[in-house]
Amino acid sequence: MISIVCPFYNEQDVVAAFFGRLIPVLNETQEEFEIICINDGSSDNTLLGLLAAQGRYRGVRIVDLSRNYGKEAALTAGLDIARGDAVIPIDADLQDPPELIPRLLEKWREGFEVVLAQRANRSKDDWFKSHSAGWFYRVHNRLANVQLAENVGDFRLMDRCVVEAIRQLPERQRFMKGIFAWVGFRTSAVEYVRETRTGGATKFSGWRLWNLALEGITSFSTMPLRVWTYAGVLVAGASLLYGAFIIIYTLIEGIKLPGYASLLVVVTFLGGLQLIGLGVIGEYLGRTYTEAKQRPVYIVRKTHEPGGQ
Ligand code: UDP
Ligand code: MG
């Protein structure tokens, strides 16, 4: 059986179109399938649309979350209830073309445990998004000890063994791209061209993307913490040298008073440096705090299974 996992957050405009394109593709594969729709606390009529689709098509399971937990938590909820031998997360807005699914399945049958859907290019993204994404991957892959494949989103196929591995990761703050990459497994990729959204609006503004990027880096790297050791050693070394210089200078030239400007610069510079260092430590402390609370990643209001159970 194949599980399709799709998070929905205020996607009432695209629900019908989504099933309209997905169902024919799935029927053609001749496989048994289930479509797991996670309603991530939508405030519009998304749930009604999903329930209508459940009445119309077979294999539709709906997980209704108690509020908006974010896409990463919604995906986690989907992976938790998926029963398929292969699981495919896909976006609701049809930016991940369902027509690619047969090609993902083909690679899977060849023996790959993970099949990535890789974007051939970012031509459909605006300038800001494609450049910021490029920078994020460069910085992340430099700092973190898992390498994220570039131009790969959450759209991919994962074998059951991969899903079981992912479910063993207990962290509460779930940066799924990193988690997917961390578990490894035999991986292959299939290329596709990403379309623009069919309807509705993107849920990821610049600020939310920025936070997701920080989340990604702090989830999989402690480099930003370690950097402060080096900064400290460097600054302390420089001040020792400067101290030695002053002593020698005083022995030769005697004491002169002026120099409050340079003092002020050094003091404020060091103050700023310390605040940045504190901020970074605070960031990690905050993460430790949320992990220590051990709250569940999401709460389900109700699971609507097909046939109305
Ligand atoms: N999404 C979600 N919860 C959120 C934000 C987004 O479940 O808090 C879902 C959304 O409904 C869509 C997918 O995540 O199915 C991708 O969102 P979007 O298309 O807005 O992101 P983009 O493609 O612009 O990066
Ligand atoms: Mg989208």
Image (spheres, grey):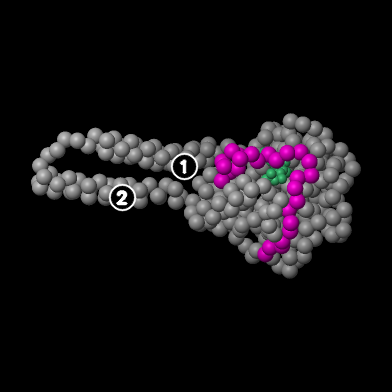
- Which three-letter amino acid code belongs to the residue tagged 2? Val
Q: Quadrant of ligand 2?
A: top right
Question: Who comes first in sequence, dot 1 or dot 2?
Answer: 2
Q: Which mark is residue 176?
A: none
Residue stretch rendered in magenta on the structure: 188-213
Label 1 close to label 2 by CB (< 8 Å): no
Between the C-alphas of marks 1 and 2, the distance is 21 Å
The answer to whether 191 appears left or right of 212 in the picture is: right
Q: Position of residue 64 (x, y in %)?
A: 74, 37
Determine the residue located farthest toward the right in the rendered image.
Answer: 56
Q: Is residue 197 magenta?
A: yes
- Which three-letter amino acid code belongs to the residue tagged 1? Tyr
Q: Which residue shows up at 77% across the image and 48% down it?
A: 94
Q: Is residue 37 visible?
A: yes
Q: Position of residue 188 (x, y in %)?
A: 67, 64
Q: Is residue 64 visible?
A: no
Provide the residue designation for mark 2.
233
Q: Which residue shows up at 79% across the image and 44% down it?
A: 198
Q: Quadrant of the N terminus?
A: bottom right
**Could you say which is closer to the camera, residue 294 or residue 227?**
227
Q: Which residue shows up at 77% across the image and 62% down it?
A: 103
Q: Which residue shows up at 52% across the image and 41% down it?
A: 291
Label 1: element kind: helix
Provide the residue designation for mark 1.
284
How many C-alpha atoms fall within 10 Å of the one at disc 1: few (<14), some, or many (≥20)?
some
**Could you say which is closer to the camera, residue 248 or residue 271?**
248
**Could you say which is closer to the camera, residue 187 or residue 307?**
187
Label 2: element kind: helix
Q: Nearer the viewer, mark 1 or mark 2?
A: 2
Q: Is residue 286 magenta?
A: no
The answer to whether 215 appears left or right of 193 in the picture is: left
